[in-house]
Image: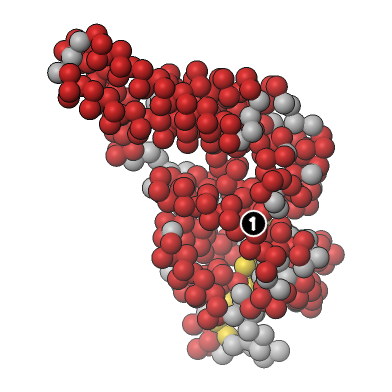
Amino acid sequence: MTQPSPEEEKQGETPEPDADVTRLFVGDREVILVGTAHVSRVSAEKVERIIREEKPDTVCVELCPARYQALVNPEAWREMDIVKVIREKRAHLLLSHLLLASFQKRLADRLDIRAGAEMLAAVNAAKETGAQIAPIDREIRTTLARAWGSMSWRSRFRLLYELLTSLGEADSLTEEDIEALKEKDALELMLKELSDVLPELRRVLIDERDLVLGHGMKNAPGKKIVAVVGAGHVPGILANWDRPVDIAPLLAEPLKGKAGKVIKWGLPTLVIALMAAGFFHAGTDAGVRMLGWWVAANGILGGLGAILALAHPLSILTAVVAAPITSLNPMLAAGWFSGLVEASLRKPRVLDFETLGTDITTVSGFWKNKVTRILLVVVLTNLGSMAGTFVALPAMIRIFGLSA
């Protein structure tokens, strides 16, 4: 294999016969960038072959430390503390992660290959050749928190809808379709569609991680590095290869914006002030009617959310009672209480953790598995309670206006 010319070194890239492989340079260090399809037998075989041929000092993989551990230790789900997840306010993030993973898992099952097989192949080949393994992706929790925080409520509903409906789309895809995702034109089309539908999601899941992955490759130890990433990240990594990157802001979870804080505290304050004004200025009857609307709308819709999650009757009752109260306290959420009750009444069994990877591939599986059903109870109760707030508030304003 010929050495790159000075002009090519200056550009940081040399042509490679394999369209999925690009050679990059950082000083006297070489980075062999391999673009893959995340559910592809061909990609897995190619990754293994390249690592064995190149014998790099380090193999970088598009995994964060948590996902790396999950890949090499598939039984890690058994150690998850679902109560801790709820108390740390991570139920919606974990549910989003499982929904994202479900589509990839369904594709893998359809093609009779393990999801993330190319990453596992990279890890195994690295161990065989004595190379260091460097997970260079951003923590999945941080990525999901940044994605969720950057989206409007409308976009969040749209995302959950798209993720749920995508569960059935995998059956129509063939192995040729998956390999076609690595073609430049098809990939650009996918990213364009993603930008049109949810531009906030594309920025966090694609653009930011392009920078994080590129930074990880440049700072990996050793003279020769093989970096294995999804083909969707390759164009962004190449476009930003010579750019300096301030990585710290990209690794931090988002801070609450001023507008969000105003809404978070302002809405409950408005409701309490409106209710007080109803009692003191519009009369006791009007105040009682306003209070009734608040309790009924929040309680009924919060309980309806729990019902849609097929919650235990006591969990549903908890949602009905908690929703009108927690909606007036920005530090609390009805779903946390209904979820904790659900977790205590229907504790996940070892079997639920063992079948989690299979259950998330179907819509019915999300409701059948006790782990995911608890997450659904939390999320759907919160959504119902939120809807109750926006139903009750206009009715309360109308009552006050007519009675004042």
Judging depth in this view, the residue of 245 and 80 nearest the camera is 80
The x, y position of residue 137, in whole percent, is 59, 56
Residue at 62 percent of width and 19 percent of height: 314
Secondary structure beneath disc 1? helix
Judging depth in this view, the residue of 32 and 87 nearest the camera is 87
- Few, some or many residues within 10 Å of mark 1 (<14, 14–19, 20+): many
Residue at the disc numbered 1? 167
Residue at 67 percent of width and 85 percent of height: 18
The x, y position of residue 171, in whole percent, is 70, 65
Residue at 27 percent of width and 24 percent of height: 396
The x, y position of residue 71, in whole percent, is 75, 53
The x, y position of residue 166, in whole percent, is 60, 58
Residue 55 visible, this orientation: no
Displayed quadrant of residue 366: top right
Identify the image quadrant of the C terminus.
top left
Identify the image quadrant of the N terminus.
bottom right
| 349 over 159 or under it: above or below | above
Displayed quadrant of residue 311: top right
Q: Is residue 205 left or right of residue 231?
A: left
Judging depth in this view, the residue of 308 and 179 nearest the camera is 308
Q: Is residue 41 left or right of residue 221?
A: right
Q: Is residue 250 left or right of residue 163?
A: left
Residue lying furthest right: 128
Disc 1 marks which amino acid? Leu
Judging depth in this view, the residue of 132 and 331 nearest the camera is 331
| 184 over 129 or under it: above or below | below
